Image (spheres, helix red, strand yellow):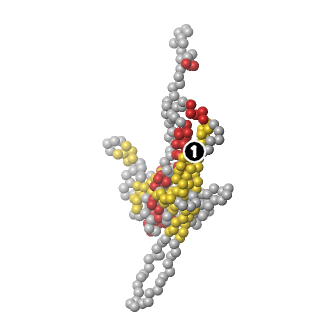
Amino acid sequence: MALPTNTYTSYDNANSIKEDLRDVIYNITPFETPFRAKCGKTSAKATSHEWSTQALRSSAQNRHLEGDDTVAEVRTAVTRLSNSTQIFKNAVSIPGSDVGLDKAGKNREMGYQMLLVAREQNLDVEKALFDNNAKNVGANGTARELAGAPAWMTTNVDFQNGNGGANPTGDGTDARTDDGTPTAFTQAKFDNVMQSIWNNGGRPDTAYMSSFQLNASLSFTGNNNQRANVVAGDERVVNSISIYLTPWGQVGLMGSRENRSRDVLILQDDMWEIAELRPARNTPLGVTGDSERRQLVQELTLVCKNEASSGIIADNTTT
């Protein structure tokens, strides 16, 4: 096959052919924030947000003689806790020339970039809520930092202590100490923590875990283990578990991309709250030249109303 002499092809005419660029931008980066979405919302009035917890005494035999004098008993004091608000901030600067540009998949660059910033910042918030960080009240030159969920839990826990692992104090002032020799996440670990939560009065709703640990949960067994079976009639293979039912309650298993893979958190949703000192705001910054600048800023903290309502399985292997 030969090209006829002097045929003027599309390759010769490349400078005259318009580009074929779709007017859409494809982005599959995940931006779900399940923990933040399930947390309640409240307002903070100071950079140190405080709350109180209380517990009943243990049950005891309660019997008395007729006519006996009544004596007041020792009462348990309320515990006062606090967490620091953390500032989340991102900014975008776009040159003035953007106004005249004809772009594919977007109109104004600033609007498009701020949409991306909002999603990215929400992921930053979710990561902070899950991080094993102690609170930091901050100072001149030091940013405030909120204590993440692992730093609060001490009552219903499963962790390794053979190579340095230890619980935090439980008031947000220090982080958990990761053990140097993690072990595999198992159904036995999960059941033990669920039992401990029940014994202490908790009613957990959601267990947050990485994709690796979620895959490990597929090996959980029970008297209704119908996973990994072909559903008759439609040729689907079902291999999933979304609700795990135990004698101590049922809990949803939720995959989380921002949760530390070594931690499995079993949380009672209504015992966790986001306290906002400043809700997210998209505001313009001062003009300093031929550009437009905007920032997205929010300030918030995590409230652990009562850590005994929830639990953690720490120090799990991640590979």
Q: Position of residue 221 (x, y in %)?
A: 42, 56
Residue at 53% across, 17% down:
10
Q: In the rendered image, which quarter is residue 284 located in?
A: top right
Q: Which residue in the structure is indicated by mark 1?
A: 284
Element marked by disc 1: strand
Q: Is residue 67 above or below residue 50?
A: below
Q: Position of residue 297 (x, y in %)?
A: 56, 50
Considering depth in this image, is 154 or 75 the residue closer to the camera? 75
Residue 120 appears in the rendering: no
Going by the picture, which residue comes out furthest to the top?
Answer: 5
Q: Is residue 255 above or below residue 56?
A: above
Going by the picture, which residue comes out furthest to the left?
Answer: 233
The count of marks equals: 1
Considering depth in this image, is 226 or 139 the residue closer to the camera? 139
Q: In the rendered image, which quarter is residue 247 located in?
A: bottom left
Q: Position of residue 44 (x, y in %)?
A: 53, 60
Residue at 51% across, 26% down:
20
Residue at 55% across, 9% down:
6
Considering depth in this image, is 163 or 313 the residue closer to the camera? 313
Q: Position of residue 294 (x, y in %)?
A: 58, 44
Residue type at numbered disc 1: Pro
Task: Sort mark 1 into few (<14), some (14-19) or many (20+) by Cα contacts within 10 Å.
Answer: few
Considering depth in this image, is 158 or 307 the residue closer to the camera? 307
